[in-house]
Amino acid sequence: MTETEFERLMQTIADGWNEGNARKSADCFSEDGIYVEPPEKQLHHGRDELYEFFGGDHGTDIPMKMTWHHLAFNEQEQIGFGEYTFEMHGRYHGIVVVKIEAGLIKHWREYQYPTELGWEEFTSHNPF
């Protein structure tokens, strides 16, 4: 996968969440993909479980909103990073680290911080 393809994949996940399209987002993961917020705050195995976690056939009770602020990708190692803001049951700013295999996300590891601050306020001491 190239850096451009990685950026497109990550944007597809965000678009799926923003559109309420669980299938669109889940299809970015391998059949046996693992999604975790360490140590085990959130832990989901496989595309089918992720589809349900992302809203499944019925959608989520309130809309999701995902915005990427920075994305970076190491093509040789097929490991990427993304800094984001996510809103659903509150606002979170965080970072995700992903491992790509065969063009899909095999591993997703996220770290997030709940806050009421907007992105500009949250990063005000070190904006870029």
Image (cartoon, rainbow, N blue to C red):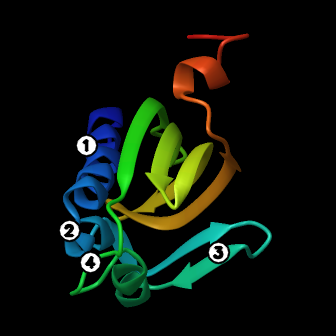
User: Element at badge 2?
Assistant: loop
Q: Nearer the viewer, mark 4 or mark 3?
A: 4
Work out whether mark 3 precedes mark 2 in sequence or the reverse, and give the earlier one. 2
Residue at image location 62% in from the left, 56% down from the top: 110
In what element is the residue under mark 1?
Answer: helix
Name the residue that disc number 3 marks: 42
Disc with the residue nearer the chain's start (2 vs 1): 1
Task: Tell which circle, 1 or 4, labels the residue nearer the N-terminal end.
Answer: 1
Q: Nearer the viewer, residue 96 or 72?
A: 96
* Mark 4: amino acid: Gly
Q: Position of residue 107 (x, y in %)?
A: 54, 66
The mark closer to the camera, 3 or 1, is 3
Q: Residue under circle 1?
A: 8
* x 22%, y 75%: residue: 23
Q: Of the residues shown, which amino acid type is indicated by label 1?
A: Arg
Do the CB atoms of the residues marked 4 and 3 lie less than 8 Å apart? Answer: no
Residue type marked 3: Gln
Say which residue appears at 23% left-offset and 65% top-offset.
20
114 to the left or right of 47: right
Q: Position of residue 119 (x, y in %)?
A: 54, 26
- In the picture provided, is 32 more to the left or to the right than 64? right
Which label's residue is closer to the chain start, 3 or 1?
A: 1
**In the image, is residue 69 above or below residue 92?**
above
Q: Is residue 46 above or below residue 28?
A: below
Task: Bin the neighbour count of mark 3 within 10 Å (Cα to Cα): few under 14, some 14-19, many 20 and up.
Answer: few
The label number, if any, that marks residue 21 in the structure image: 2
Other residues around mark 4 within 10 Å, as few (<14) / some (14–19) / many (≥20): some
